[in-house]
Image: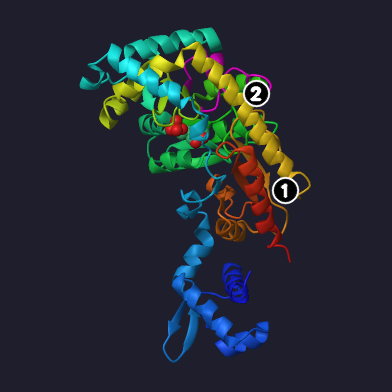
Amino acid sequence: MSKSEQVYETVVQAILKGEWKPGDKLPSVRCMGSRLGVHRLTVLKAYQRLQEDGWIDVRTKSGFYVCEKSVETKKPYVESPSYKDDSILYQMSRALIAPDLLPNRHLSSDIKQLLDMEPRLLGTYSSTAGDLRLRESLADYLLETSNFSVTADELLITSGAQQAIDLAARAFVKPGDHVLIERPTYGPAIEALQEQKATLHPVDFTESGYDMNQVEHLMRTHQPVLFYIIPTFHNPTGFTLSAYQRKELVELAEQYKCLLLEDDVCHDIYFDAPPPPPCFFYDTEGVVVYIRSFSKYISPGLRISVMMARGDRIVKLLRIKAMTDNGSPLFNQAVFRHIFFTDRMQGHIAKLRIAMQLRKASMEQQLEGSGLTWISPKGGLNLWVKLPPGWDVNMLIHHSLKASVSFLPGAICDPWDSSTPYIRLSYSYLNEKQLAEGMKLLLHAGKMLQP
Ligand SMILES: Cc1ncc(COP(=O)(O)O)c(C=O)c1O
């Protein structure tokens, strides 16, 4: 780091730590130079860069001041989209499987073949519930692989799990309703539920699952209309709820008439053994609405997900889906149907599992002995990592972004604790060599935070 970069860093850290607040005057160039033992031109160069980057303002004949905007930057690295920036070299903020791991060449020839077979495919809409042939194939597939007894009429094809969550929130939650959500959880689901003006109550989700007394207490006291859950390879923690707790939860939900909105986006990305059956499997009273998304590991570009609900719940969802887009694109559904049920694709998913497990091992190897702690997940795409004392998440983002490394700050998944010491690291996007390089840079950035 050059001397002027060191001055720049000193000022940024003082602002981020709140030692210098918006409107505070910075030491003069001369004074700062002698304080840090550097030439005043070096300080001037750093101040100019700080000004360009929006940290400080210059006031004529008065000096340099911390500008108002700098504080926005402080708190909300977390809210800022900078960690999602596509130009970042070491993307560990994205829970996305690297596009080159999809069978792209096969997909392209399959799509050509499909259009030859069905030349009029692009000329028509899907029905609101989704292509009947796809729903029938999925009902058979779910019976065979998960022992689900569902009919095509109980299935709704959506454009990803994200849309499914939003449809459920709009269909089942009214302003003022009480809703349970896991803590931590998938950030965009929090937003979808908040959008309905629900009162949210957090349920702690740990390695050993829920505290069922807490769940029972919340259900009894608040009569929640819905509990949004990710029991399988949870995002962000990677934890998986045991079969025993799944059964218990369904019983409680039936007792308190609380809909369980079960989100399952990484079902097939398990490492040593398949996960327990979804809560939907244990439900006999239609209290679970289940979302199985294939975006993550079949094709994010097609964004196909299926929602399962019984009785009038599916009718309500269909009504909202009709208002939203009146059916997901038929082309995407037809391509999915053409590629998903083949032996080749099922073989490909088995290979993906191995690739993800190797990538996870590579990330864990780098973390070994670093002072960061985590619980190794049994599937999924992420590690939920606890930072050692003294590592400030905002500062870590600041330093790691400079090294072109991104991760997801834990506060996005836990709105109740803006200073949570957790971060989510995704191992799915980078190959093992890139993961090793990215992790070294991240840990180096962390070491710079140590006093
Ligand atoms: C728990 C969870 N739900 C929903 C989604 C959105 O999935 P989709 O891409 O199918 O909309 C994600 C994506 O990261 C997720 O992790």
Q: Choose top left, top right, bottom left or bottom right for residue 347.
A: top right
Task: Residue at 48%, 10% (x, y): give it.
Answer: 141
Image quarter of the N terminus:
bottom right
Q: Does the stretch in magenta take in 282?
A: yes
Tag 2 residue: 245
Q: Secondary structure at mark 2?
A: helix
Residue span colored magenta: 263-289
The answer to whether residue 230 of the structure is visible from this angle is yes
Q: Choose top left, top right, bottom left or bottom right for residue 230.
A: top right
Q: CA distance from mark 1 to mark 2?
A: 29 Å
Q: Is residue 159 left or right of residue 219?
A: left
The answer to whether residue 206 of the structure is visible from this angle is no
Task: Residue at 59%, 72% (x, y): give it.
Answer: 5
Task: Residue at 42%, 17% (x, y): give it.
Answer: 339
Who is closer to the viewer here, 60 or 112? 112
The label number, if any, that marks residue 372 in the structure image: 1
Q: Does the stretch in magenta take in 285?
A: yes
What is the three-letter code of the residue carrying label 2?
Gln
- Is disc 2's CB within 8 Å of ligand 1? no
Q: Choose top left, top right, bottom left or bottom right for residue 46.
A: bottom right
What is the three-letter code of the residue carrying label 1?
Leu
Who is closer to the viewer here, 164 or 2? 2
Residue 207 position, x and y percent, is 69, 34
Q: Residue furthest left?
A: 123
Residue 307 position, x and y percent, is 42, 22
Label 1 Cα crowd, 10 Å radius (few <14 / some 14-19 / many 20+): some
Q: Secondary structure at mark 1?
A: loop
- Camera-side mark, 1 or 2: 1
